[in-house]
Amino acid sequence: MNPARISWLGGAADGSQRWIAYHGELEGPGLRLHYGFDGWQEPVQEVAMETVEPGLSIAEIDQLDGHLRVDCAITNGDQWDNNGGYDYRLWIGFDALDAHQHVSGGGAGALGIRSLGTAMASAGIVAGVSSWIDNRALDHVDRAAARLFPLVWVRPGDTSVAEVKRRLADGAVGLKLHPTVDDYQADDPRLDPYLEAATRSGCPVACHSAPGDADPDHIRRLAERFPDTPVILYHTYLGPEEGRLRALEHALEQPNLYLETSWCRWQMVRRLIRTVGPDRILFGSDASVDGPAHYHRHPPNVEGFETYNEGLISLVGSLDRETASKVMGDNARRLFHLNGNSHG
Amino acid sequence: MACRRIVKWFRDYADDIEAVNIHFTLTPGGQSPDWERSRVTRYMPLVTRLFRMKELRLPQSIADSSGNLIREYSLHYYFEIWRAGDRHYSPLYSEEVVNEAVNGAGREENRRRTVERE
C-alpha cells in the first residue's frame, strides 16, 4: 500500500516545481499523464511521461500558478491507472496530512489499509495520524509504507500505563481517547496517569468530542488539569452547531485546546480558523470509515452536503497559502513532532 | 443514582475480528426502536481469548409517551463487528427489562450469554 503513488518529485511542490513522479505498474514509451486542475476543471491536458527506472516515471507540467491542486490519472494507451476509479490528486505548495484517520488492519474492507491508501491518494493526503480501538491492529501493518503515525488508544482501567509508555517509545505520536464508546467521562480522574505519561513524552492527546460523556465541557476540564499538554477535540464536536460553538469558546479560553475538523463543512472550518487563529486548527477526516471513496463519496458524506474533496478546494482557495499549509498539515506536524514541515 | 446492570457477551467467531461494538436503545415495552433518535454505542473488549463482555448500565425507569416513568421497558441491541476492515451487523435482539420497585433489586445482573455466529 502506498498512498503516494503519485507525488511531487522531491517533495511538496511550490510555484516553481513542476515534476510529477509516478510509482506504479504502468510504464513504457507510451505512458502519459492525463491531468486537470482544481477538480478536473477544463482544459484537461495530457503530457508524455518518461520512465527513468523500473517503477518510476516522471512528467513535467506547467501552468501551476493560480491553481490549488492537480487531478490526474495515468495511461499507456491501452490501460489506465486511475487509482481504482478514484483518480489521483496532489496539492500545490504543501503536503496534506490528515490528523484523524482509522485503520483496522490489513484487511480488504473499508477500514483496511488498502482502502485507506486509495482514499488518501484520491485526496492528495501524503500522511495521516491513525488509531484503532484495539491498539494491536496497527502492529500488523507497514506504517512507514502507508505513512501512518499511530496514536495509542487509551481505555482507562483497561489499558496499562506501561503499555502506553511502551507504545510511545515505540513510535506512537500521541494518545487517543473515545469516552463515548469506552463509557467514561472525558474528565475522568482515572485518565490522569495517562495524561502524565503524555506530558512527559511531550505528545498530544486527541479526544473524541460529541454529546454526552465526550462533551467539550468535560474535555476542557481535562485540558485544564494538564495545561502543558495539547488536547485536540476530534471532530471539534460531532453534533449540533451549538456544541461546535461551545467547543470554539473553550478553545478561545483554554490555550492548550486544539480543534480538528472532521465532518465539519468547509465554511465552519473557515469560521474556526478566523476565530481561534490558524495555528490551532487541524484538518482531519475520519478516513477511511467510508472506504476508498471516503474523500469524495456520493451522496456527500460531510453533513450530507459536500464531499471532503469539494470542501477542501473551497477552503484552501479561501485561505492564504501560509494558513492553508498550517491547517492542512503543518499544525499536526508541529503538535505530533513529525519530521518537519514538508515531509510525511 | 442506582442503575440496572446487564452484562452482554460476544464470542469471536473468527480470528480476524478487529473490534466489536454493541449498540443499544430503550423503549417502552412493545415499541420499535428509533435508532436515529436514541442510541448508545459501547466497545466490547476481549476478556478472554474468545469472549468479549460489556456491562450495560441501564436506568431504573424510562419515560413513556405520556411522560410517566415506567420500570418495565424493552432493551434493543445489536452487535457491530469489524472483520478484515469491513463492518458486519448481527441480528437485532430485544428483551424485556423489569426493575422491581424495591431497594437493591436493580443490582441483579443478567448473565445470560449471547453467542454470535455467522
Image (spheres, rainbow, N blue to C red):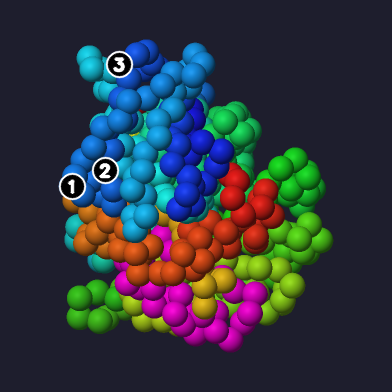
Q: Which residues are magenta?
A: A248-276
Label 2 sits on residue: A36
Above or below residue A329? Residue A122 is above
**Kind of residue indicated by mark 3:** Gly
| Image mark 2: chain | A
The numbered mark, 3 or 1, whose residue comes first in the sequence reads 3
**Kind of residue indicated by mark 2:** Gly
Quadrant showing the C terminus of chain B: top left
**Distance from Cα at disc 3 to Cα at disc 1:** 23 Å
Q: How many marks?
A: 3
The numbered mark, 2 or 3, whose residue comes first in the sequence reads 3
Hey, which quadrant is residue A197 in on the image?
Answer: bottom right
Checking the image for residue A30, the label placed there is 3
**Distance from Cα at disc 2 to Cα at disc 3:** 19 Å
Label 1 sits on residue: A42
Mark 3, secondary structure of its residue: loop
Identify which residue is drawn at 53% across, 56% down.
Answer: A329
Residue A86, visible in the rendered structure: no
**Residue B35: where, in percent of width, then height?**
26, 58
Left or right of residue B37: residue B113:
right
Identify which residue is drawn at 33% across, 48% down.
Answer: A63
Hey, which quadrant is residue A188 in on the image?
Answer: bottom right
Please say if the residues under marks 2 and 1 sit with CB atoms less than 8 Å apart: yes
Mark 2, secondary structure of its residue: strand
The numbered mark, 2 or 1, whose residue comes first in the sequence reads 2
Identify which residue is drawn at 40% across, 27% down.
Answer: A108
| Image mark 3: chain | A
Mark 1, secondary structure of its residue: strand
**Residue A219: where, in percent of width, then height?**
57, 73
**Residue A248: where, in percent of width, then height?**
47, 80
Question: Which of A140/A73 is in front?
Answer: A73
| Image mark 1: chain | A
